[in-house]
Image (tube, rainbow, N blue to C red):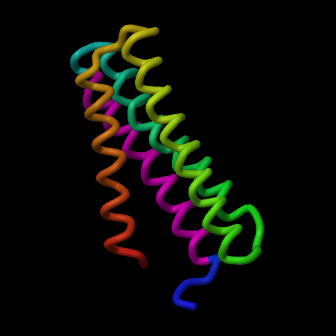
Amino acid sequence: MLNSIASGRRLALRLLLWQLVVAMVVGLAFSVRGFRWAIAGAAGAAVVAVGNALLSMRLFSQVSGAGMALGRLLTGMLLKWMVIVGGLITIMFQFKLPPLAAITGLVAAYAVNLLAFRFKG
């Protein structure tokens, strides 16, 4: 076994916290353009954080065999992408917030993924 479940939980929590920090930073960066831009940027990053939190909760909920773990991973990924796509549709089409800010927040939150898995500890 390369990693323990506790290690995965710690990494998921650290990733979630960094994504929420990035959401605030993106919101502050877009605040120079106005309130709607700031909300869109922060919400775009927060949607990714919520999706990753749901995936983590689903994946690390209980210990069982490999087949169950794979099933929880796949359902968690499906849930994550439903939340992200649904959240972006809501941000851009229902609330009519600026798409550039929302997509920038999404990309910034995913950049945290790359850094979190690159520098584990």
Q: In this view, does 35 lie to the left or right of 12?
A: left
Identify the residue shown where x is 28% and y is 20%: 99
Q: Does the magenta stretch include residue 11?
A: yes
| In front of the other: 37 or 84 | 84
Q: In this view, does 63 lie to the left or right of 59?
A: right
| Residue 7 on image: x %, y % | 58, 77
| In front of the other: 79 or 99 | 79
Q: In the rendered image of this protein, does residue 101 appear above or below residue 14?
A: above
Q: Quadrant of the N terminus?
A: bottom right
Identify the residue shown where x is 57% and y is 60%: 13
Identify the residue shown where x is 76% and y is 74%: 64
Q: Quadrant of the C terminus?
A: bottom left
Figure disc tally = 0
Q: In the rendered image of this protein, does residue 29 appear above or below residue 73?
A: above
| Residue 33 on image: x %, y % | 22, 16
Part of the protein shown in magenta: 7-31
Q: Is residue 18 magenta?
A: yes
Q: Residue 120 occupies which quadrant of the picture?
A: bottom left
Q: Which residue occupies the extreme bottom position in the image?
A: 1
Q: Residue 22 occupies which quadrant of the picture?
A: top left
| Residue 30 on image: x %, y % | 26, 25
Secondary structure mostly seen in magenta is helix
Q: Which residue occupies the extreme front position in the image?
A: 67
Q: In the rendered image of this protein, does residue 8 appear above or below residue 15?
A: below
Identify the residue shown where x is 35% and y is 13%: 97
| Residue 57 on image: x %, y % | 67, 55
